[in-house]
Image: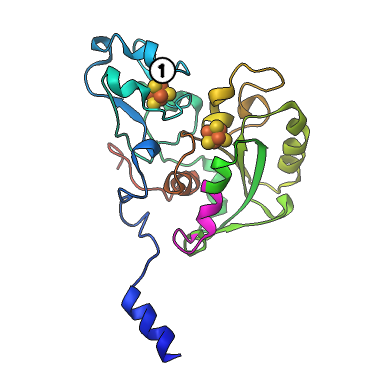
Amino acid sequence: MSTWLGRAWARGILTTRYPAAPAADDEAPETGRPPMPTRPLDELAEAPGSCPTGAIGPAAVDQGKCIRCARCRAAGFALTGPVEASGRRRSELVWPGGRPGATVPEAGLAPLGRSVHVFLVDVGSCNACNLEVLALANPYYDATRLGIFFTNSPRHADVLLVVGVPTEEMVEPVWRAYEAMPAPKAVVAVGACPTSGGVFAGNAGLRPGLDAVLPVDRYVPGCPPPPVAILDAILALIGRGRPRAGEA
Ligand code: SF4
Ligand code: SF4
């Protein structure tokens, strides 16, 4: 017993301090952050052509389409945006214009209070978003310390986390999971795939995004988003996310 206590004392606390403290560099590496133009967009003529997903337009960047490939770096972008980048509406992911990372919860979700149960459904992912979501259950991110619990049944779930681009085969299963959840309930689209189709957008047998299947309450950009971004989106959903720049 004293040996275990001694080891624990020597190691200290390894669990992340997020969201009490900002995300550390290794929790939100460059490929986990949104691309931001380093100069006014209209001075970066090469940028739209460098982007494989059409995320960069002449006047705005659609973070929901961005796959964090960093090809736009040579054209004057830097992947330095905030990890708190999820939005309640698809339009909030189009910067500037949208409001990066608005954290105000939908009024109907207030009864979820300080504890939520989460059910994960993969509707057609590459598995990377799955891994980032499941990292929330490990001792480092330890989502249970924040009142976030994974459940194996949609009947016990408050929040439906969806990863992957919606394949036709998964439309009915994910809809049935949603219908089985008791109200109030919320849906979070995790990653570029359920948000915009990501790298698979336009392919046969796919829906263009999760909002073509279910009402979505939160979109989390990234490919994949890092665990802190997913954690923040769940907390923002119920009004407990980190304050954003410009928010009270
Ligand atoms: S990181 Fe890649 S996908 Fe995202 S805006 Fe830049 S070029 Fe486009
Ligand atoms: S968003 Fe990217 S990482 Fe996530 S499932 Fe789609 S391709 Fe994979």
**Picture quadrant of residue 116:** bottom right
> Is 134 inside the magenta-drawn segment?
yes
In the displayed structure, does residue 13 sit left or right of residue 148?
left
Residue 108 appears in view: no
**Mark 1 highlights which residue?**
51
**Picture quadrant of residue 2:** bottom left
Query: Which x, y percent locates residue 224?
Result: 49, 38
Coloration mode? rainbow
Magenta highlight range: 132-142
Under circle 1, the secondary element is loop
Residue at 62%, 36% in the rendered image: 125
Count the marks: how many? Answer: 1
Residue ranking furthest to the bottom? 2
Q: Check the picture and name the quadrant holding the C terminus.
A: top left
Query: Which x, y percent locates residue 187?
Result: 60, 39
Q: Height in image: 2 above or below 105?
A: below
Query: Which x, y percent locates residue 51?
Result: 41, 17
Q: Height in image: 27 above or below 223?
A: below
> Is 154 inside the magenta-drawn segment?
no
* Closer to the camera in the image, 55 or 246: 55
If the picture is divided into quarters, which one holds ligand 2? top right
Residue at 36%, 48% in the rendered image: 242
Q: Height in image: 189 above or below 204?
A: below
Residue at 36%, 45% in the rendered image: 28
- Decide: few, some or many residues near mark 1? Use Cα within 10 Å; few <14, some 14-19, many ≥20: many
Q: Amino acid at mark 1?
A: Cys
* Closer to the camera in the image, 143 or 197: 197
Residue 151 appears in view: yes
Q: Height in image: 43 above or below 68?
A: above
* Closer to the camera in the image, 210 or 247: 210
Q: Disc 1, ligand 1: is the CB inside 8 Å? A: yes
